[in-house]
Image (cartoon, rainbow, N blue to C red):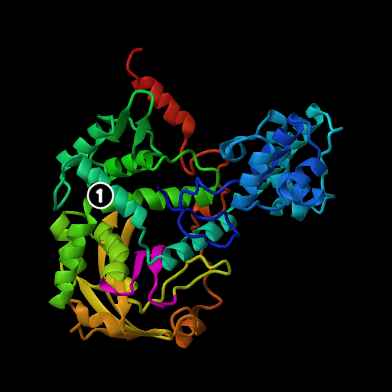
Amino acid sequence: MAITTPRAGRTPEPPRIPLDDEPDALVVGRRIRHLRTRRGMTLEDLGAAIDRAPSQVSMLENGKREPRFSQLHQIARALDATLEDLLAPEPPSRRDALEIELERAVRGPLYAALDLPRVRVGKGLPDDALEAIVALQREIARLHTERAATPEEARRANAELRTLMRAQDNYFPELEAKARELLDSVGHVRGPLSQRVAADLAAHLGFTLHYVGDLPHSTRSVIDHRNHRVYLPSSAARASSDPRSALLQALASHVLGHAEPGDYAEFLRQRVESNYLSAALMLPERDAVKLLREAKEARQVSVEDLRDAFAVSYETAAHRFTNLATRHLAIPVHFMKIHESGVIHKAYENDGVQFPADALGAVEGQYVCRHWTARVVFDVEDRLSPYYQYTDTPSGTYWCTSRVQDTADGEFSVSVGVPFAHVRWFRGRETTERAASRCPDETCCRRPPGPLAERWADQAWPSARPHASMLAAMPVGAFPGVDQTEVYTFLERHAPPS
């Protein structure tokens, strides 16, 4: 099972729930019409049989009204059919399938935005004309998606995903259940997930592991579904700091049935799902919650202890803490991963902290206040010990713990924080480090001090170094950032002889 994220611009929905027993009104309507005409009945005949006006029957057949369950029984008897005949999920004919697709398009927001007259599909419309209209509609939708695949839409999708995560306290029970199922399948009882058990999990899912030195540069791993292989990097420079991570994320995408994403929102959803399931495997819910509850009772909650107990990176432990803290410990929390430049790389919150955000609500790419723990930590010489700090902000006082990690893309700080009312549960609460932030007030840290500005205001002309990705549109019909030709060439090179 997977979480669902709405397309950009729509209101977030709750996690997907299988609704196999909920009929599609359009399909049911076409099946009623198909069975009625096959029996030679008119709208009046069927209406009389079920004690409804012909106009009401017409609305049912056109999918404009959902029939009640009792009505479906009446209709099935009148048509000498079974309930299964009415509720079968597939349209009764190719023509009906095209009519349904066109009707859905006409009812959608894209068609409404075009301000076109409503299409009425009558019996006199030839099949080839209907095929052409539907094909044109598909092409318009494709071009609209291509036009929408911009950094603006990516930021909008990211903001909507954060809203969904916040609404659920970043906890997804269906993914936790899937992790437990997978761990049980390989006999993992408790504690950290070893590399051997991770390999056992791959074997259980039918895959063999292959470590190669020529993995496509744009990938962390590649799955060959045809030959049931998982390719991982053999070079230490390219491999993840945790050799389990890339494998488990690849297996997670397979287990969750991910297909090629159609847009950036789906790509983000898939990435969140695979990362979540991977972390839930490395830090099983039952064991991690037990450790955290004992730590809370002792008032010694620590991300470092979670990291050490399960032999994972600090960032993985911090992420996993956000999954479990609110649901199991009743502690609201925020998380940040900040580049040394001060730019937000990742962020999550459900504790009221106010991250800087753009007009679309996206926080990635925004600059964090210089006085926040996540930026102050870069100037701390002691990189072995965790850094703790209280920060007074316009939305309240927050305590935060932070660490700096080196990566190929520079230094990043990873921080976890909570409101002042919850700091009593954490190790490090006794820190005397304290700062005040007035952001988003520009006088806090965005504007240079007066004397400095007076001296240099008209004497400096810096050349910005923006990321190319800031201006690039999302590749359409491909995994963002992945060269598929390179991937397919790689698979062809490594495929076993047939």
Q: Determine the residue positioned at 23% across, 58% down.
A: 285
Q: Residue 381, relative to residue 184: is it above or below?
A: below
The residue where tag 1 is placed is 180
Q: Nearer the viewer, residue 34 or 456?
A: 34
Q: Is residue 343 magenta?
A: yes
Q: Is residue 276 visible?
A: no
Q: Nearer the viewer, residue 45 or 374?
A: 45
Q: Nearer the viewer, residue 78 or 373?
A: 78
Q: Position of residue 288 (x, y in %)?
A: 20, 61
Query: Residue 329 vs residue 149: left or right?
Result: left
Q: Position of residue 52 (x, y in %)?
A: 76, 51
Q: Determine the residue positioned at 34% across, 32% down.
A: 215
Q: Determine the residue positioned at 51% across, 63% down.
A: 159
The region drawn magenta spans 329-354
The quadrant of the rendering that contains the C terminus is top left
Q: Is residue 431 visible?
A: yes
Q: Badge 1, how many Cα within 10 Å: few under 14, some, many 20+?
A: some
| Disc 1, SS | helix
Q: Position of residue 136 (x, y in %)?
A: 75, 37
Q: Residue 481, relative to residue 360: is it above or below?
A: above
Query: Residue 104 vs residue 244: left or right?
Result: right
Query: Residue 451 vs residue 383: left or right?
Result: right
Amino acid found under the numbered disc labelled 1: Arg
